[in-house]
């Protein structure tokens, strides 16, 4: 459950919507929104995921992450 919340947080920060919302808006497209991301979005996402992994390993709560 924590992973899903973290993933949704990153998706909202980068794409403005959750994966579920994207699927509802794009029922005819195969894959997911990350499959459709451009190179700049993918680089940002990789950096955000790296930071998020560090926060998790340090035990930083989701609420604290949102404040940073």
Image: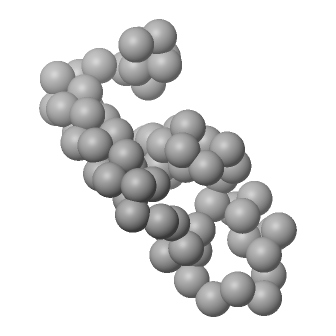
Q: Residue at x 67, y 44 (%)?
A: 16
User: Which quarter shows the C terminus?
Assistant: top left
**What sort of colour scheme is used for the picture?**
one colour
Above or below — where is 51 with respect to 30? above
Residue at 48% across / 43% down in the picture?
Answer: 10
Measured as percent of width and height from the top left, residue 34 is found at: 50, 67
In the visual, does 7 lie left or right of 24?
A: left
Image coords of residue 48 (percent x, y): 34, 40
Asked if residue 56 is positioned above or below residue 23 in the image, the reply reads: above
At horizontal 40% and vertical 20% (from top left) the residue drawn is: 65
x and y, in percent, of residue 55 in the image: 25, 27
| Residue 14 visible in image | yes
Name above or below for residue 65 compared with residue 16.
above
Question: Looking at this view, is 37 or 27 the one in front?
Answer: 37
Q: Residue at x 63, y 60 (%)?
A: 19
Residue 21 lies left or right of residue 15; in this view the side is: right
Q: How far across and how far down the image is residue 24, in percent?
A: 81, 69
């Amino acid at each position: 459950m924590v992973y899903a919340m973290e993933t949704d947080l990153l998706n909202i920060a980068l794409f403005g919507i959750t994966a579920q919302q994207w699927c509802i808006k794009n029922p005819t497209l195969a894959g997911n929104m990350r499959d459709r991301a451009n190179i700049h979005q993918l680089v940002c996402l990789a950096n955000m995921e790296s930071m998020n992994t560090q926060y998790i390993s340090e035990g930083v709560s989701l609420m604290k992450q949102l404040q940073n």
